[in-house]
Image (cartoon, rainbow, N blue to C red):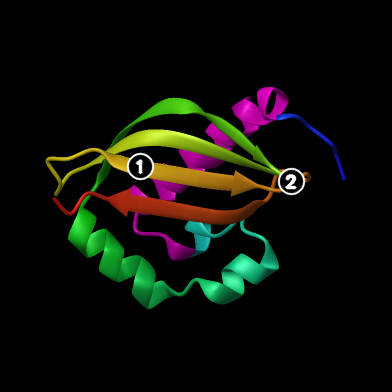
């Protein structure tokens, strides 16, 4: 297990995000989950992935906002844009000390 600070694992988070975006836009659930911990893979499912993809459309862009240190996890935040939304989306990607994805969240505006 590594003990990286948020500053040190920002580039790893960017790599993980790049893989997520690519898998999302290719509609590949298996590739989307490749860097998930076992617990997250067990929680996430293909039907949820497909439903959210259908609502959101293609993942268009990301702007890095920063990182929060939460215990032994690093929560990286991006402002993301999706094809079917005129609003920005807050996307968070939580990495453990080994650099695996333990959580992710897309918060779409409902204004």
Q: Is residue 42 left or right of residue 60?
A: right
According to the image, label 1 marks what residue? 90
Q: Residue at x 35, y 42 (%)?
A: 90
Mark 2 neighbour density, 10 Å: few (under 14) some (14–19) many (20 or more): few
Quadrant location of the N terminus in the rendered image: top right
Q: Is residue 6 left or right of residue 51?
A: right
| Residue 26 in sight from this viewpoint | yes
* Residue 59 at x, y percent in the picture: 29, 43
Q: Residue at x 54, y 37 (%)?
A: 76
Residue furthest to the right in view is: 1
Q: Magenta segment: does it hold 11?
A: yes
Q: Residue at x 24, y 38 (%)?
A: 88
Where 43 falls versus 29 (above or below)? below
Where 107 falls versus 37 (above or below)? above
Q: Which numbered disc covers residue 71?
A: 2
- The quadrant where residue 65 appears: top left
* Residue 51 at x, y percent in the picture: 27, 70
Instruction: Give SS at disc 1.
Output: strand
- Magenta residues, start to end: 6-29
């Amino acid at each position: 297990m590594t003990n990286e600070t948020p500053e040190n694992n920002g580039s790893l988070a960017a790599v993980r995000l790049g893989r997520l975006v690519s898998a999302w836009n290719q509609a590949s659930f298996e590739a989307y989950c490749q860097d998930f911990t076992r617990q997250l893979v067990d929680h996430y499912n293909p039907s949820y992935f497909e439903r959210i993809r259908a609502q959101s459309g293609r993942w268009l862009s990301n702007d890095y906002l920063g990182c929060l240190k939460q215990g032994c996890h690093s929560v990286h935040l991006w402002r993301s844009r999706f094809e079917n939304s005129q609003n920005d989306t807050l996307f968070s990607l939580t990495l453990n000390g080994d650099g695996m994805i333990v959580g992710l969240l897309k918060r779409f505006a409902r204004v």
